[in-house]
């Protein structure tokens, strides 16, 4: 800078000398004293600073501020800055007269406050303003909203009968001699789902471990009247039945550790295979569904359940070991049908613990569907940590996390079972 106030900086004088780096700091400069460089062809005119020579004289269709003469009041001129030298920009500007690109203001017509920096995204001339928070389709709803909708649907707070009720009581035995395939989990969640939607359901815990009683938060410690008293001491079933807290239309017959000795004690009892059948038949009340949770064996307890039931529900884990013992279970069911219960049939197959990441799960599913056909439910239960966490709180997954994938899958399975029961009603006296 000279004493008379002149600058040698080519950025200020506009000379064709060596360009000065934009990283050079000039703390005494004021933006109003620095003339703006001319815009490039097709770019917008500057909106601040000293206008460049030739702009605002009306010959290029712009006023003194660089705005088009006939522009709409709502139109905004978007400044475009490029990282090129001053001399190069002037050379391009001399060859191509500047033209201001007018872009409509993308702001809505309402009094929406402007951003802090005063900037708005550019938009096409005919583009409509759409908020990013506004869903345009149903599938675009936020995940939390979809989860809340599923939760309300599953919990059914209105208490209406949304699942069809069968004409007669359906007694279903949930059996599989392999352990860990989801028998108890399936029994508890299907029973809760049906009860929440208007069906009267009874759960008979026939497993000495008492896991079904735990999942329904029913006391089953030593000294509590349980299913053992019905099988050994001929106590009426209604005397050992407990209402499940918080779930209307749901009752449970608990199992205590005493049931572990029932296998041996039943050996000498008359009509040992039909003790449970007589207890259920003599029950004075009416149920739409009776679910019997069987132990992981093919002993007398499981035989009692098969004799008392009309239908068998087999949960199958989507792994090879679950298929290995399936033939033996089917053979035992056929023996019971031939000698003790002609009405017994395998009506439902439910695939559990499905892991979509593995090819093995797909292979098991295809094998089961090819072999059993329409008996396999379309609903498949995936691996879901919420299903495993729920029993530790004394709940089913339907009430613990009704919006989870596990709850949704069991709800779909229960709905499918209910619809099948209406299409093909089953009678104990048929």
Image: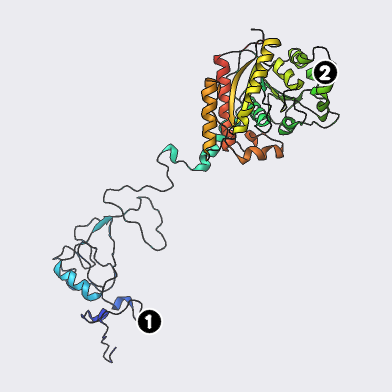
The vertical placement of 256 against 130, above or below, is: above
What is the secondary structure assignment of the residue under circle 2? helix
The circle drawn on residue 267 is 2
Neighbor class of circle 2 (other Cα within 10 Å; few <14, some 14-19, many 20+) is few
Q: Where is residue 387 in the image (x, y as percent from the top left)?
A: 63, 37
Q: Relative to the observer, which residue lies in front, 237 or 284? A: 237
Q: Is residue 288 visible?
A: no
The residue labelled by disc 1 is 27
The tag earlier along the polypeptide, 1 or 2, is 1
Q: Real-space Cα distance between discs 1 and 2? A: 101 Å
Q: In which quarter of the image is residue 361?
A: top right
Task: Point out the image quarter for the C terminus.
Answer: top right
Q: Position of residue 308 (x, y in %)?
A: 71, 15
What is the secondary structure assignment of the residue under circle 1? loop
Q: Quadrant of residue 294?
A: top right
The vertical placement of 171 against 83, above or below, is: above
* Number of numbered markers: 2
């Amino acid at each position: 800078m000279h004493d008379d106030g002149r600058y040698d900086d080519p950025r200020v004088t506009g000379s064709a000398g060596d360009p000065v780096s934009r990283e050079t700091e000039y703390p005494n400069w004021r933006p109003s004293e620095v003339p703006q460089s001319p815009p490039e062809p097709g770019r917008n005119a500057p909106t601040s600073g000293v206008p460049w020579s030739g702009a605002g004289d009306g010959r290029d269709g712009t006023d003194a501020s660089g705005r088009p003469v006939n522009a709409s009041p709502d139109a905004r001129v978007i400044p475009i800055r490029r990282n090129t030298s001053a001399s190069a920009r002037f050379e391009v500007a001399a060859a191509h007269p500047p033209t201001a690109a007018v872009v409509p203001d993308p702001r809505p017509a309402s009094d929406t406050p402007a951003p802090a920096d005063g900037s708005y995204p550019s938009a096409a001339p005919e583009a409509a303003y759409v908020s990013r928070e506004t869903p345009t389709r149903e599938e675009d709803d936020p995940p939390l909203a979809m989860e809340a909708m599923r939760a309300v649907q599953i919990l059914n707070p209105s208490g209406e009968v949304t699942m069809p009720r069968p004409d007669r009581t359906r007694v279903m035995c949930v059996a599989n001699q392999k352990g860990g395939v989801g028998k108890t989990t399936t029994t508890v969640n299907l029973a809760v789902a049906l009860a929440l939607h208007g069906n009267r359901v009874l759960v008979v815990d026939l497993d000495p471990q008492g896991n079904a009683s735990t999942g329904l938060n029913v006391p089953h410690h030593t000294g509590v009247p349980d299913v053992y008293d019905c099988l050994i001491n001929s106590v009426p079933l209604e005397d050992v039945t407990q209402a499940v807290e918080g779930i209307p239309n749901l009752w449970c017959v608990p199992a205590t550790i005493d049931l572990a000795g029932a296998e041996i004690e039943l050996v000498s009892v008359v009509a040992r295979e039909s003790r449970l059948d007589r207890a259920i038949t003599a029950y004075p009340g009416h149920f739409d569904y009776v679910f019997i949770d069987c132990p992981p064996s093919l002993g007398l307890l499981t035989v009692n359940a098969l004799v008392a039931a009309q239908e068998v529900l087999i949960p199958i884990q989507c792994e090879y070991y679950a298929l290995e013992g399936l033939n033996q279970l089917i053979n035992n069911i056929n023996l019971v049908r031939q000698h003790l219960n002609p009405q017994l049939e395998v009506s439902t197959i439910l695939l559990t613990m499905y892991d979509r990441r593995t090819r093995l799960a797909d292979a098991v599913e295809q094998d089961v569907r090819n072999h059993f056909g329409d008996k396999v439910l379309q609903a498949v239960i995936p691996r879901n940590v919420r299903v495993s966490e729920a029993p530790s709180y004394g709940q089913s997954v339907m009430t613990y996390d009704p919006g989870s994938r596990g709850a949704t899958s069991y709800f779909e399975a229960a709905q499918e079972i209910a619809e099948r029961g209406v299409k093909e009603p089953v009678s104990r006296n048929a």
